[in-house]
Image (cartoon, coloured by chain):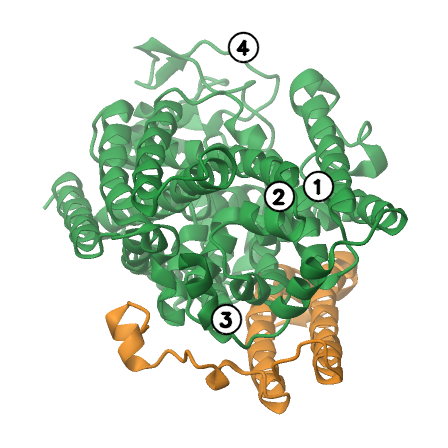
Amino acid sequence: MSDSHSQQAKAYWKENIRIVLSLLAIWFLVSFGMAILLVDVLDNIHFFGFKFGFWMAQQGSIFCFVILIFVYVYKMNKLDHKYAVDEDRDNFAPDDTYYKNQEPLE
Amino acid sequence: MDVQTLTYIFVGASFTLYIGIAIWSRAGNTDDFYVAGGGVPPLANGMATAADWMSAASFISMAGIISFIGRDGSVYLMGWTGGYVLLALLIAPYLRKFGKYTVPDFVGDRYYSNVARFVAVVCVLFVSFTYVAGQMRGVGIVFSRFLEVEITTGVLIGMTIVFFYAVLGGMKGITYTQVAQYCVLIFAFLVPAIFISMMMTGNPVPQLGFGSTLADGSNTHLLYKLDQLSIELGFEAYTAGKKSTIDMFFITAALMVGTAGLPHVIVRFFTVPKVRDARISAGYALLFIAILYTTAPAVASFARVNLINTVNNVEYKTTPAWFKNWENTNLIAWVDKNQDGKIQYIAGKAFMGKPQFLEMRGAQGERKISNPLNENGNELYIDRDIMVLANPEIANLPNWVIALVAAGGLAAALSTAAGLLLVISTSISHDLLKKMFLKNITDKQELFFARAAAAVAIIIAGYFGIHPPGFVAQVVAFAFGLAASSFFPVILMGIFSKRMNKEGAITGMIIGLTFTASYIIYFKFINPSANSADNWWLGISPEGIGTLGMLFNFIVSGLVSRITAPPPNEIQNMVEDIRIPQGAGASYHHIKS
């Protein structure tokens, strides 16, 4: 897919945006939603030794952030593969020797 | 062995390691110096980013602040981690594909304008210098308390070490030292946390101990006990918030967006070989950061319970040695208001401002202060910064743990300082000289200027470390507010909107910056006495105003770009190109030729 103006590129970008927006919706929900806007309501739920809202604010949201990025990486790698834009197809493909040498192979 | 000998051994060993790495990873050309040759493996980049990001403030101050403000401290926990989601999803992969050295490079090229580039350079320098002064100060504090040398000497030693690996190794040296520094700092943070969690709750995992019952046989959950103690002493309940919801919302957003716009973090994603690596290394970075950030609130609550139990209603004469040690470094002060020889620790400030110590001792042997006292029963002043540093002593942990914490604090401060100094030197040698004023210099000369700029920046940072301007704490709000209201929208629109042009970007940046800066300057410098919720616009504090500045930036740049000419074709093609991962490996070859 050398021509980035193509329909393919547009479709790839559209799917990319959809992935990003759906993950950002979760990002917003677990932090701003549950840990700030609804924190007092959720505090009525007892979650192990925590009030649930407090736990989301100081622990839960951070765990969710980490998971979100790894889900994003997984989904994007799949998407890149689907549209054949992944970098394995480049002429320049770093491999183990590349990492060892720390110098780009010309 | 005593604490001091052990500290010398730990700090000495870690410094030797850093210097060894610096010599091993010398930079040969500007490519190495700016982006470590673009060949850093993603896992190493994740660790380096984590060390780069977690500063003296994260290591030393954050748990202490949370310890004193309870749930409201969540703004820092979420703000300084949630930004990585934005960074990973919206910024890092695309800037890696763009493949240039700096944030001003992107702004200047994408908006085909040296004015935009120049505004970006000025912001980078301001944000980075603000930050670096605090790091050098952190180095000084750790040295003066644990090694009992003058703060000045401590700062000078720190400067020498950073000079060594930042000037010699550039990004390459910094990256691999940061990997080592991450290991040192996370180990140093976790060991005491695990010890204390075991001691207080019997659970070795601090994140779980945080929600467990106390090991003292009372069968009460730690947090419920802490709420109860806090209320008894007249404080707010630990798990309840004091800040308004709108302020919590805006501060968290400003810190998140600011994080995603900070140049020394963004530039780390230029160092990996591929777009895919940029994505995954953002994941690793946040994972490594989260290990500390989920431990910190646990440490905060343990430390608070411990502190109350150790000092409240205890006779000054029988307090443990750490109490007097920290009193001698000006970070604890006690005034016996009711003359009973015991420490009363309850809500309210014992006196106004920081303690002004006199050269004399009181009836109990305490250091006398000259501050006018407040009319309340509280007799104790504790600087928030000591909670993490003093925690092992408060909990009576072995001497080697205390020494380890000193080495960890230094690793945190030095790694962040180095990352910032690199960004400063790159903006000067690359963005200002090579791209604007001395376009004809060779790669060798550019490398020389980069090294010289790093050296000068270290000296300036050291000066601020020794003579800290009184406003360091205030300008932190500035750094995040500026990054949020200027860089983030400009970079985001540069990637996600092909229609965004230079007129829109420049007006947006100027409006966002001016609005945010004037709000902060008014409340922090011109009229600090008015800095309270009643006077804030919509109840938003200066710490959170960057979010509103960012919104204004988006609105104004959107409007202006619609009524002016669209960007030239080649720019629109460039935007389409950075959206596709393919070809990222090749982009460094373009730069070289």
Residue found 34% across the figure and 60% down from its top: B37
**CA neighbours of label 1 inside 10 A, class few (<14), some (14 to 19), many (20+):** many
Element on which disc 2 rests: helix
- How far, Cα to Cα, is label 1 from label 3? 33 Å
Q: Is residue A43 visible?
A: no
- How far, Cα to Cα, is label 1 from label 2? 8 Å
Disc on the earlier residue, 1 or 3? 1
Q: Is residue B92 above or below residue B533?
A: below
Element on which disc 4 rests: loop
Q: Nearer the viewer, mark 1 or mark 3?
A: 3
Name the residue type under label 2. Answer: Ala
Q: Would you name the residue on which mark 2 appears?
A: B483
Q: Nearer the viewer, mark 3 or mark 2?
A: 3
Q: In the picture, residue A99 is in which quadrant?
A: bottom left
Q: Position of residue B584 (x, y in %)?
A: 50, 71
Q: Would you name the residue on which mark 3 appears?
A: B584
Q: Nearer the viewer, mark 4 or mark 3?
A: 3
Name the residue type under label 3. Answer: Ala
Residue lying at the far right of the rendered structure: B563
Residue found 39% across the figure and 28% down from its top: B331
Q: Chain of mark 1?
A: B
Q: Nearer the viewer, mark 1 or mark 2?
A: 2
| Circle 4/circle 1 CB separation < 8 Å | no
Q: Is residue B561 above or below residue B311?
A: below
| Circle 1/circle 2 CB separation < 8 Å | yes
- How far, Cα to Cα, is label 3 from label 2? 26 Å
Q: Chain of mark 3?
A: B
**CA neighbours of label 4 inside 10 A, class few (<14), some (14 to 19), many (20+):** few
